Amino acid sequence: MRVDKIVIEFEWNEGNREKPKKHGLTPEETEEAFFDNNKVVFGDWKHSEAEQRITLLGKTKKGLLLNITYTVRKNKIRVITARPINRKEVPLYEKTA
């Protein structure tokens, strides 16, 4: 699955706004990774039961690499979780750079 280069809107509310903060991130930093030209996007089939989940590996403006799991609801990107990538995930991102 691909993420369009132009993201129309993100859905942030009480249910997901605090999720990035658990990992020292802001929602705004999380959104930055979606605009990374070298981002890697793949389906998260293991966790896609009720709705399709997608994983994105992308870099923020400050160069922080993130692992973001999200879904699309009514043409809005809803972040489920966001965290810095671990060292095992770095090669997955670097293959595109």
Image (cartoon, rainbow, N blue to C red):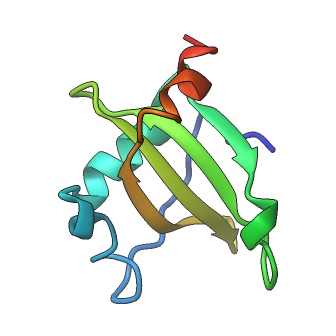
Tell whether 88 sits left or right of 55. left
Residue 81: image location, x then y, percent: 45, 66
Q: In this orientation, which residue lies closer to the viewer: 86 or 6?
A: 86
**Extreme-front residue of the structure:** 88
What residue lies at 54% left-to-right and 16% top-to-bottom? Answer: 94
Hey, which quadrant is residue 18 in on the image? Answer: bottom left
Residue 70: x and y, percent? Answer: 59, 63
Q: Nearer the viewer, residue 56 or 61?
A: 56
Which image quarter: residue 60? top left
Pick the front one: 22 or 39: 22
User: Would residue 4 be seen by someone viewing this image from the given angle?
Assistant: no
Is residue 67 in view?
yes
Q: Is residue 34 above or below residue 83?
A: above
Q: Nearer the viewer, residue 75 or 69?
A: 69
With 2 as the anchor, is 77 left or right in this view? left
Counting from the top left corner in percent of width and height, residue 4 is at 67, 39
Q: Is 94 located above or below residue 54 in the figure?
A: above
Q: Residue at x 22, y 55 (%)?
A: 25
Number of marks: 0
